[in-house]
Amino acid sequence: MRILCLAVLLAGCGSDSKTGLEGIYMVSTWTRNPTACDVEGPSVATQHDMFFYIKDEDFIGTHFVNVKTCNDLAACDTEANDDGTIHIGEFNFEDGSDKSGWKNHSAFAFATQGQCEGGVTDTTMTAASGAIRIEERHVEATPFPAGTGSDECPDDKVDQAAAGKPCTELEVVTATFNKKF
C-alpha cells in the first residue's frame, strides 16, 4: 500500500487544489451594464458559452483558479481533463478562498499619442449552495502622460489614475454546479 501511495504522489495524481469549487457549471444568467455599476444590465447570455469549468491551475509554481467557458459539457470535460495544457479562461483568480470569495485586480493601459488610456478591473467570485456568482467591475482611468522605456503605462500609475473614479461597467455571471470533471 505504501508503494502505491508513493507512486501516486510522484506521478502528481494527488490534489493540492486551492479550491473545492472545481467542476463544470451551467450559466444561469449573464448580464452587462456598460455605463454604470449601480444595477445589473440587460442579459448578454446569448453572446457567451453557456457552460464553464472551474479548475485550480499551476503555471511555473503560481497557483490560480481558472474559470474557462465552453460551448457544451463535452468540451468542458475534454479541456478540464487536459492536464498537459492550461486553457486560460475568461476569469482568473489568484487571491482568496472558497469561504471568503476569490478576487482578481488588474490594471491595464496602452499608450496612444503620448497618453496612457485604460482602466482598472476588479473581479470577485463567490459561492453558496452549489451556485457561483462572478462580478466584474471596471473603472476608466483618467488619461495620463506616457513614460519612456519598456513600461510606458505602469500598473501603479493606472491604479492612481482610476482612484476615486466611479465604476463604469458591471458584468455579472451566475451559474449552478452541473458535474465534476
Image: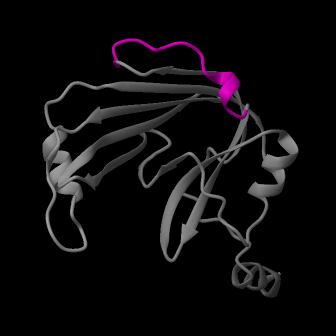
Residue at 31% from the left image edge and 25% from the top image edge: 168
Residue 88 position, x and y percent, is 60, 57
Residue at 29% from the left image edge and 42% from the top image edge: 120
Q: Tell me: 42 left or right of 118.
A: right
Q: Is residue 102 above or below residue 178?
A: below
Is 21 a magenta residue? no
Is 38 a magenta residue? yes
Q: Is residue 48 above or below residue 153?
A: above
Residue 91 position, x and y percent, is 53, 45
Q: Tell me: 82 left or right of 161.
A: right
* Region rendered in magenta: 36-49
Residue 15 position, x and y percent, is 65, 65
Q: Is residue 28 something one can see in this rendering?
A: no
Residue at 59% from the left image edge and 62% from the top image edge: 57
**Most foreground residue, 104 or 155:** 155
Residue 22 position, x and y percent, is 66, 48
* Quarter where residue 52 is shown: top right
Q: Tell me: 154 left or right of 32.
A: left
Residue at 17% from the left image edge and 42% from the top image edge: 143
**Most foreground residue, 63 or 141:** 141
Q: Is residue 37 something one can see in this rendering?
A: yes
